[in-house]
Amino acid sequence: MDALPSPHDLPYWLRLSLTPHLGVHAYALLKAFGLPRDIFEQPIARLLAVVPPAIAETLHRPPLSDIVEAIETTQDWLAHADRHIVTLADPTYPPALLTLPDPPLLLYVRGHLPTLQRAALAIVGARSATADGLDNARAFARTLAGSGWCVVSGLAQGIDAAAHGGAIEAGPQAAGTIAVMGTGVDLVYPTRHRKLADAIAAHGALISELPLGSGPRKHHFPRRNRLIAGLSQGVLVVEAAVQSGSLITARLAADANREVFAIPGSIHSPLARGCHALIRQGAKLVETAEDILEELRAPDLFGRKNPLADTRRTRIVETGEDAVIDGDEADGEGNGDGGSRTAQSVVARVKAQTRARADQADPLLSALGFDPVSIETLAARTGLDAASLSARLVTLELAGDVHALTGDRYQRRARR
C-alpha cells in the first residue's frame, strides 16, 4: 500500500509544476533527485549536471512572487471537500496516464478521486453534431457507464456534452464520467456547461493539468486531448469531419496502443467522413454499445494490439528504486516506448522516495524489515510493549502493509 504524499510536500510539487520553461526537464530532475522538495534543496552545481543553467538558476533561487501567490491560491482552493491535487507520487494517480511519455506532474481534480481508478472509455466527436449523433453519443455512454466503463470526454459542445450526459443518466451506481478540461479546473468552458460540470463533479470528476485560472487557449486543447486518450482503454468517435480534433484524439489513442472505434454514417454527411477515414485505417466499426463491450470484455490497458498503432507492447515492472523494462525496443520514430520508459522510471524513483519518507515517519515499518519477525524481536527493536505492538500491527495488517504469520510472527508486505 503506497503512502500518500505529505501535505508538506504539496507546495514543492506545485512550485515544480509552475516553474516556467521546465518541460521534460522535470522528469530528469525527479529521476535524479526524487521528490520535488529534494530538487529545490540541491546545490546549484548538482542541478547544473541535470538541467541547463537558466533552469538551474530558477530552481536554486527563491520562487517568484507570482508562483508563491499561485501556490497560496491553490491551497485555499483545496479547502473544499471535493477538490484535490493528485501528484505522480500519489496512489490515486490514474494508472493509465503512467503509460504516457509525459504524464502530468500533478492533476487538479474536482469530484470523486475513486473515479480516476476506473476502467475508462472516451467518447469524442463533433461540436456541431447532428441530432442522430447526439442521440448516439448519449445512448452509447449510458450503456457503457451502466456496464462499468467510466466515460471520458472533453466537456465541449456537441458529442462531448451528450456523452457526459448519457453517463450521468446511467445513475449513481454506474461508473460515472470524467471531463478533461482545456482550462483550469476552477473555470468552465464553454460557460453554458456550468450545470453540466456540477453534475459531472457529483457523478465523477473534472480534471486538468493546467494551473487554476488558466483560460481557454488554443494550445491547451491538444494537451487535453492527449489526456483523454491516455486515460482511456479505447476511444469511440461518434461524428467527426476529416480535419478535426476528434481524429487527433483517435490518433493519440492509437499511438498509445488503445482501441479506436467509430460509428459509420451516411456517405453524404461531412460529419461521417472522419469516422469512415478511421475505419479505413483500421478502427473498429461499431453499431451498438454491445459491440464495444464485446471487444473490451476484459479491461486491460496493455493486452491488445491496436491496428492503427505501430507501438509495441512493453511490460514495466517496478523494482522500487527504478524500473526494469521487459519488452520490445522503441521504434525510433518518437512514438515508441522511450518516453514511457523515462516516465515509469521517474515514477518508480519518486515512489521509492515517498516510501522511504513514510518509513521514517513509521519506525515500526522500518523495524519490521521484510523477513518474518516475532513480537519479542519487535519489542526489543522498538522499545514498545507487546500490547501496543499488537494494536499497531493489527492496524498495519488492515492497511495491507503487514502479513500475520503463524507462530505469532509478522512480515512486511512488499509494496508496488
Image (cartoon, rainbow, N blue to C red):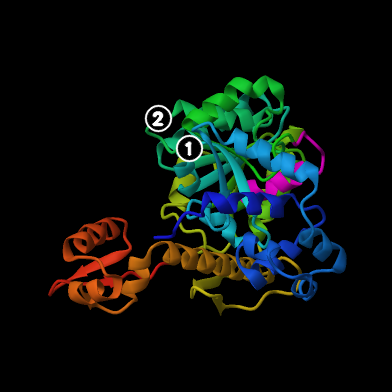
Image spot of residue 99 (x, y percent)? 59, 61
Q: Nearer the viewer, residue 22 or 225?
A: 22
* Quarter of the image where one finds residue 245: top right
Which residue shows up at 41% across the image and 42% down it?
A: 148
Q: CA distance from mark 1 to mark 2?
A: 12 Å
Name the quadrant of the N terminus.
Answer: bottom left
Comparing 398 with 43, the one in front is 43
Could you tell me which residue is drawn at 64 percent across and 38 percent down? 74
Q: Which residue is denoted by mark 1 in the rendering?
A: 112
**Who is closer to the viewer here, 314 or 298?**
314
Vertical order, 242 against 362 (above or below) = above
Sort mark 2 into few (<14), some (14-19) or many (20+) by Cα contacts within 10 Å: few
**Residue 312 in view, yes or no:** no
Q: Which residue is mark 2?
A: 172
* Secondary element type, mark 1: loop
Residue 228 highlighted magenta (yes or no): yes
